Image (spheres, rainbow, N blue to C red):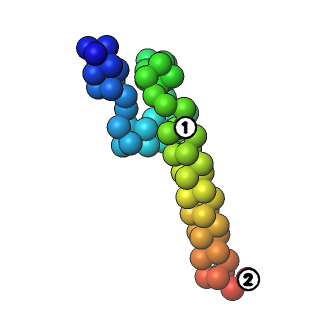
């Protein structure tokens, strides 16, 4: 029972998962943090957060391009 509570305390929070995925997207993730993520994180969390952040990134780029195109008169 002690190992289960220890592993639960090592499981990253949702905010921690977002931080890890964001650092990975920018390529600044440390090897220590990456090792921590792979050994204590749940893959499904990282996959879902990665997909959500990718969609948000694409929509942001699309929105900025739309605004620039509208302002330039094209």
Residue 2 image offset from top left, x and y in percent? 26, 14
Q: Would residue 25 appear left or right of 2 to someone viewing this image?
A: right
Q: Nearer the viewer, mark 1 or mark 2?
A: 1
Q: Which residue is mark 2?
A: 74
Q: Residue furthest front?
A: 1
- Give how far apart the Cα atoms at labels 1 and 2 are: 42 Å
Percent coordinates x, y for residue 32 in the rendering: 43, 17
As rendered, which of 48 and 59 lies closer to the eye? Answer: 48
The quarter of the picture where residue 15 lies is: top left
Which residue has dot 1 on it?
A: 44
Return the x and y of residue 73 as percentages of the image width and height.
Answer: 69, 85
Can residue 22 be seen here? The reply is yes
Specify which label sits upstream in the sequence, 1 or 2: 1
| Picture layout, residue 71 above or below residue 23 | below
Q: Is residue 19 left or right of residue 65?
A: left
Which residue appears farthest toward the bottom when viewing the image? 73
């Amino acid at each position: 029972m002690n190992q289960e509570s220890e592993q639960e305390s090592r499981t990253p929070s949702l905010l921690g998962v977002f931080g890890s995925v964001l650092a990975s997207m920018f390529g600044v993730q440390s090897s220590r943090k990456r090792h921590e993520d792979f050994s204590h994180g749940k893959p499904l969390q990282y996959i879902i957060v990665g997909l959500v952040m990718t969609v948000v990134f694409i929509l942001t780029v699309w929105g900025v391009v739309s605004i620039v195109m509208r302002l330039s008169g094209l």
